Image (cartoon, rainbow, N blue to C red):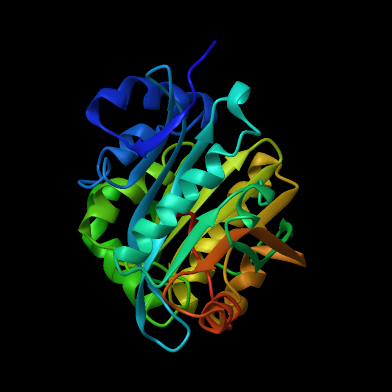
Amino acid sequence: MSAAAGYRTAGPDDLPSLRALWAGAFAGTDVTALWATDPGRFGRTFVAVRDERVVAAVHYLPRRIRAAEGAVDLVGGVANVATHPPERGRGHARRLLDRAVTAMTADGCAWALLFTGTPAVYRSSGFRTFRLGYTSGRPAPPSVAAPQGWTVRPGSWADWPALAALHRGFNAHRPLSTVRGDHDWRHRVPTWYAPPAELLVAHRHGEPAGYLVRERSAGLVRVLEVAGGVDALRVLFGAVAATARVDGAEQCVARLPADPVVRTALPWLLRDPLPEVDETGMVRPLRADAARLAATTGAPGAFHWPGDYL
């Protein structure tokens, strides 16, 4: 008969079973490698252990996220929540989330944030779902040629300082967006936008003026992140639509905020746009009240980029 499960923070000896747990739960993304870049990872990872083997885990990472009124909140980003299939339904996730909530509050986090396809797992721990709107449609028809001096070329994350400046300018007042640091640009952003995602950079007279991240698959192109002014986005959107037509893509998903700049440039990307809703995000008050969270998640233009997933 197996021993009862115990609950504690992780240690270096847990790494083999943590790696196995996460590899089984998150196929396609090496979350262990991303987790390993967090200097405080062991103290912020809570595990359920049975027979000296990790059977469930929760990790949180403190993140700086913009709030509705312009302030920056310290937020506990909940990630890598996983339970071995035979251990599901035994309350491991709830007990580990309770420990994470206590630790995040002690660390001074105002609220907690996570993204999931299984929201029911988190409701008993006080998390609520919020909605982010975006658009989809058919690729736009050919537009006028790009203005003189503009070019679009494949980019490299090695050039992150220029991209970071564009991102900062585009999101300086965007609620729910992450204040990225050097570590994010060197590690987290390239991991979440690894191939098959592609980085395109718009140059004006040779200088970077905007960028776009897209992902192509059979019959579909998804735009995951942008930054830049209207002219830069028009040039980038036109390039994406042109490639989509060549590829025979029938649908384009623009996972982008309801932003005046995006809205103005969107006809260069989409025709017959349709509203869509993303309900994978969840929040929980810690030191902040629920009204502050509602104001942030519901603010005009509020958005959280996939490159900042936890």
In the image, residue 296 lies at what x, y percent?
Answer: 52, 79
234 left or right, relative to 6:
right
161 left or right, relative to 88:
left
Counting every numbered tag in the picture gives 0
In the image, residue 233 lies at what x, y percent?
Answer: 50, 69
The relative height of residue 204 versus residue 157 in the rendered view (above or below) is below
108 left or right, relative to 277:
left
Camera-side residue: 217 or 300? 300
Which residue is pictured at 38% across the width and 41% down the height? 46
Which residue is pictured at 27% across the width and 40% down the height? 42
In the image, residue 185 lies at what x, y percent?
Answer: 28, 54
Q: Visible in this render: residue 310?
A: no
The relative height of residue 202 versus residue 55 in the rendered view (above or below) is below
Q: Visible in this render: residue 183?
A: yes
In the image, residue 203 lies at what x, y percent?
Answer: 34, 64
Please state, as top left, top right, bottom left or bottom right, where the N terminus lies in the image.
top right
Q: Quadrant of residue 277?
A: bottom right
Camera-side residue: 221 or 49? 49
